[in-house]
Amino acid sequence: MTLKLPETFTYEKRGKIALMTFNRPEAANALTREMLIGMDAAFDDFNADPDLHVAILTGAGARAFCAGMDIKTALPAVAAGDSMGYEDPVKRPFQTIYKPIIAAVNGICMAGGMEFMLGTDIRLATESATFGLSEVRWAVIPVGGSHIRLPQQVPWAVAMEMLLTGASIDARRACEVGLINRIVPADRLLDEAFALAEKICGNGPLAVRTAKEIAVRALNNEPNFVLEKAIGARVFSSADAKEGPKAFAEKRKPDYKGR
């Protein structure tokens, strides 16, 4: 069956490697509902295809990998009770995909975009890449598993600074703290990602998938994801969560009340 994907998320099969691309460069590859649906369908196909061994996830254009959800539409929807695809309390990006996923980060990697990156296994980035979880600035929180995954992947103090201030870090700092594997020249990003994918494809596919499955399942993150969703719900039902996106849309400083 041929997949029908939106133009804003593309999926190519190149031998044993799948190339997935956020394709909305004019909007810094900000996520829409149709992109999320398309992405789920593409990764389901990748996961089920025995001829595909590795996926590469990147963003179109030179400006951004993915700037997260389109804040003008997504945050008000979430504040109004829209789960934006996270109805399942343990569903988090790529949680049950045991084939390797490489992120090729070519610019802004923020909010939801970073949440997807946190679900990948190996990360290459350009010098211009920036990483952050800015949600608290708009009185909401990242609900894609970042409260669990980020402290597992970088030192506690670094994770807390990012989560609590909403500030971003550059590629050099991201590499220093282990958030990404290495920085590569922009014109070599995809070439380097494919070279790494080909190296993985040269290994025993069952061994590779099993190695990842053991590592992921040993973290036992599902109960933690349930906790994140349950406690996080109180934020999205608050008056502040409505004020934040409204202030952003009106280009003014938000007036938070703490309720």
Image: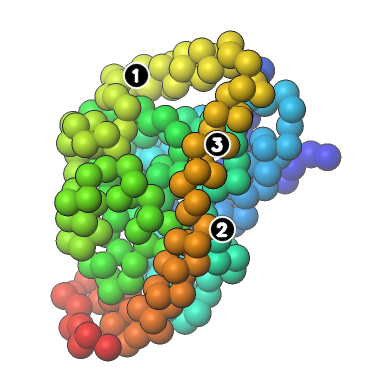
At horizontal 74% and vertical 42% (from top left) the residue drawn is 3
Q: Quadrant of the N terminus?
A: top right
At horizontal 33% and vertical 71% (from top left) the residue drawn is 140
Q: Amino acid at mark 1?
A: Asp
Q: Disc 3 marks which residue?
A: 214
Seen in the image, is 247 located left or right of residue 228? Answer: left
Q: How many residues crowd around disc 1 within 10 Å: few (fewer than 14), some, or many (20 or more)?
A: few
* Front: mark 2 or 1: 2
In three-dimensional space, the C-alpha distance between marks 2 and 1, rounded to whole angstroms, equals: 34 Å
**Where 81 sits versus 94, above or below?**
below
* Front: mark 3 or 2: 3
**Where 51 sits versus 37, above or below?**
above
Q: Amino acid at mark 3?
A: Ile
In three-dimensional space, the C-alpha distance between marks 3 and 2, rounded to whole angstroms, equals: 18 Å
Q: Disc 1 marks which residue?
A: 187
Residue 138 image position (x, y, % from top left): 27, 70
Residue 113 visible within the image:
no
Q: In the depicted view, which residue is nearer to us: 29 or 49?
A: 49
Q: Disc 2 marks which residue?
A: 91
Residue 236 image position (x, y, % from top left): 39, 78
Q: Sequence-wise, which precedes: disc 3 or disc 2?
A: 2
At horizontal 54% and vertical 33% (from top left) the residue drawn is 212
